[in-house]
Amino acid sequence: MQDLSGAFVHAYTLITTFDPALVEIIALSLQVSLLAVLVATVIGLPLGALLAVWRFPGRRILIVILNSLMGLPPVVVGLTVYLLLSRSGPLGVLELLYTPTAMVIAQTLLVTPIVAALALQVIADLYDEYADQLRLFGASGYQIAWTLLWDARFSLLTAVLAGFGRAIAEVGAVLIVGGNINHATRVMTTSIALETSKGNLALALGLGIILVTIAVSINALVLTVRMRSERIAAT
Amino acid sequence: MPAPKAESKAEQPRADAKLRPVLPVRCHEVVLERGRRRLLDQVSVQFDNIDLTVVLGPNGAGKSLLLRVLAGLLAPDAGQLTWAGRAPDGARRLQVGLVLQKPVLLRRTAIANLEYALGFLRVSRQLRHKLAMTALEEAALGHLAKAPARLLSGGEQQRLATARALLLRPQLLLLDEPTAHLDPTSTGAIETLVLAARAGGTKVVWVTHDLGQARRLGENIMFMHKGQIAESSDAEQFFETPASTPAQAFLAGRLLT
């Protein structure tokens, strides 16, 4: 018990004094996850919008696959990317394994289905509502897409935040493709796993507190976005 | 509520009517089927010189479907729809307006909804704001310009949707029971807006199942029953001596099965 309370105190000190090791780990976590979410959004939003509006053979099957991909276990994604990037893999020549880039790739693969599937749902619902009226205006496909994306912006932002929440909190994918190398590919989640196993509770606790704070902040942000959305767009 | 500017509207040039005519809007032996049921059964109808036609009939008669076909929203399973003798096309899309029974407003302010619509007329942004504000004031919604459109009351939303449809200056305006669930004040406001547009040269087709409204508005009454036009005549003649049995039953207040 003394160890634990001591660890909490030490963790608090690490946070308030901006311990360099702590800051480095947090910075890398944010860089990797933010970049992954950015790429996932650039791919996922248009993909979701396209699937929502365009009717083509096989669309329903594609939607089922997309929804299933939302529940991909991070370790499986990590394993897949590992196989692709390892020396004997098809992309081994790029020498990306055990680099932050590999981690970004893995998290992008994890988050894109989430952003796409949520965007699809949001935009499909809005399209159902708007379709007749937009057709009466003679809106082109581009105009329809832009109108839907803009009017659904608050819900889409919520989808992106959900994607970020998933990325920042996962450990399996980044552990396998990153290797948790000190000063190179060590992020909050992998550090917590490592430090806990070493019995170094202070750092693990400090990182855990930060991670939980980030998770709570994301949820608070989602709530703020929803409230703003209700005020402005009455959704 | 300010009096509608009927005279100034009549003076404005109707360039679009010459460049992109849609009248007569005509459907010829149009059929719409769902499963084995014929929702529109060989309907042939033409709208051009009558200023305001009321389409009357019980629920399920096919009135809304007919409007959707006329507006080009729904393709018939058989038969033909023409605007000024040719198939409907994108260039003349805005010349036929339709006010839906349940107004579809974007998740924006009231004025932004009107400005959005004006974008399709390729009106400049500065002019859009001015025109939208004028239209809001004519619909007695000026004080709600910055309010989120979806937070307006049902009557205000439908007034906004009607103002939006009229803003696009269609040659033919179709209205699908626009005041069906509205209070008398909102109903009166919308009727006034549309009558002003009619005075300005817009041809109007108004679907309703409200007999009082039909009597108030219609020059010509088209009575629909079971997907067919049972009767079409001058309003006075229709109400005094309806020719068809369904119309007689409807006017007598009997349920039509």
Image: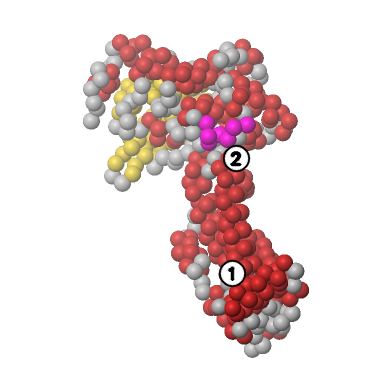
Residue B46 horizontal/vertical position (percent) = 44, 25
Query: Which stretch did the figure color magenta?
Result: B146-152
Rendered residue at 60%/74% (across/down): A5
For the point 48% across and 64% down, which residue is it?
A67
Give coordinates of residue A180: x percent, y percent: 66, 81
Task: Locate the N terminus of chain B and report the quarter of the image it occupies.
Answer: top right
- Residue at image x 32%, y 22%? B231
**Chain holding disc 2:** A
Q: Is residue B167 above or below residue A22?
A: above
Left or right: residue B76 versus residue A49 is left
Q: Measured from the top left, where is residue B28 in percent x and y?
A: 41, 32
To which residue does mark 1 refer? A169
- The chain carrying label 1 is A
Residue A232 tag number:
2
In the figure, is residue A85 to the left or right of B185? Answer: right
Looking at the rendered structure, the kind of residue marked 1 is Ala
Q: Is residue B147 magenta?
A: yes
Q: Position of residue A30 (x, y in %)?
A: 69, 67
